[in-house]
Image (cartoon, rainbow, N blue to C red):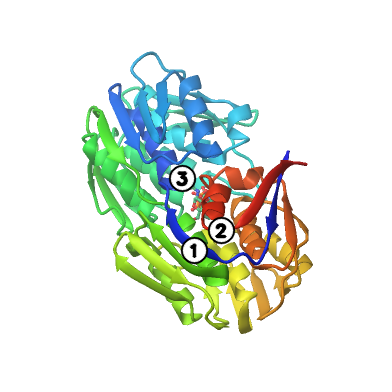
Amino acid sequence: MQKLSIEGGRRLSGVIPISGAKNAALPALAAALLTDETVRLTRIPGVVDIRTMAQLLASIGAEVQAADNAYTIRSGGALIPEAPYDLVKTMRASSLVLGPLAARCGRARVSLPGGCAIGARPIDLHLAGLKKLGATIRHDRGYIEAAAPRGGLVGGHIHFKRVTVTGTEDLLMAATLAKGETVLENSAREPEVVDLARLLAKMGAEIEGAGSGTIRVQGVDRLGGAEHGIVPDRIETGTFLVAGALIGDELRLEGANRAHLQAVLEKMEQAGCEISAPDDSTLVVRGGAELRAVDVTTREHPGFPTDMQAQFMALMTQAAGESNIVETIFENRFMHASELQRMGAHIAARGNRAVIRGKTRLTGADVMASDLRASACLVLAGLAAEGVTRIHRIYHLQRGYERLAEKLAAAGAALELSEE
Ligand code: EPZ
């Protein structure tokens, strides 16, 4: 196991390239199961979760070639529509193969993902949606077995009782090959859902309303191959914006998409961060401004993203005043708070509300990463702290950020990855 040591206080400047979005790449890879033709995806981030998904596709029987940040997938031969426990337990987004396999092969056997640090994370909404498309669902010793009717899935009206990102993506993919029309109501509006719909349309799917909250799909008999570039990672972008606001002179983020970050930009500007956008794919953040405490409640897109909550909490430790952060998406997403307290932050976290009283001097300490975004929060705090911070269990970070330490080092940070 590795740890990341950070010597805080080094000011950051220069250009940071933004990678493709992990949470757009994962459903895009799963979508390749919907056709026997070749799908080529570019701007795929080199992160552990992507390699896990590639392993899963190969175990199902797809041919997967990866070169730099491009993946070529062809699932033309006989497929084994199963996602084994040993893969799913390391990456719960494996449930994204459920819909494509039920649609393409008529059946799927996928291990139930189980919970993770931030919550129970059931997939009941995915299963309820598949039933609406005519599938029968069986629980068998920790596995879900979905079976389509003999003639294949049939279009239906699905109303999500709560917004689910991968639930929307799973059922959007299944619906593309279901007979007739499918309506997905109260669907997720995330940019990653819109990006998936764009890929599916390139493959021949007939989709309307992606990003609007109600998606209509006319099923087709088959889908073809396509080439598609993944959208930039809005959460990586937001993470570097916070780094620049905390300890930057001037950081220039290139290859971003400003339109995907409106809620984050609004809150950061309210807090006094100096951010400008020379064009739609570039953001420039300057540090040094006196920061003000602002309140944040996480919401589904286009609201403030839960995946930026931990990073924003790190920022609020350096803002003057009292900030209230309310987490409405996951039931246990404040584990970074106790680690920040060990670095000197004043945070009272109770239930889904955390109150941060800043501005406090942060000092380097040994801290423990618990999940992907909590790890990012601790990196940000380490950059701003006095002295050395050692972040243990740093594998969490490597699941979802491409070369984060390298990108920060190139901008002037002092970090070192070492064995525990
Ligand atoms: C996606 O997870 C993202 N992952 C998460 O990013 C992100 O935090 C989350 O959406 C919310 O934006 C990927 O896209 C791979 P949900 P997902 O289904 O789809 C409950 C990261 O850091 N729910 O939108 O799993 C669920 O428990 C990760 O990159 C059900 O109750 O999230 C949660 O409370 C973390 N039943 C809420 O809905 C279901 O069937 C939202 O979950 C599905 C979800």
| Residue 165 visible | yes
Q: Amino acid at mark 1?
A: Ser
| Mark 3 to mark 1 CA distance (whole Å) | 25 Å
Q: Bin the neighbour count of mark 1 within 10 Å (Cα to Cα): few under 14, some 14-19, many 20 and up.
A: many
Residue 15 x/y as whole percent: 43, 57
Q: Which residue is mark 3?
A: 22
Q: The C terminus appears in which quarter of the rendering? A: top right
| Residue 328 visible | no
Q: Is mark 3 within 8 Å of ligand 1?
A: yes
Which residue: 66% across, 81% down?
Answer: 359
Mark in front: 3 vs 2: 2
Q: For the image shown, how many numbered marks are present on the structure?
A: 3
Residue 20 x/y as whole percent: 40, 46
Query: Disc number at residue 13?
Result: 1
Q: Amino acid at mark 2?
A: Gly
Which callout, 3 or 1, points at the residue further toward the start of the chain? Answer: 1
Query: Disc number at residue 226?
Result: none
Q: Which element carries disc 3, helix, strand or loop?
A: helix
Q: Is residue 243 above or below residue 179?
A: below
Q: The N terminus appears in which quarter of the rendering? A: top right
Q: Nearer the viewer, residue 389 or 320?
A: 389
Answer yes or no: do the residues labelled 3 and 1 have beta carbons within 8 Å? no
Most extreme residue toward the bottom, as rendered? 321
Q: Which residue is mark 2?
A: 412
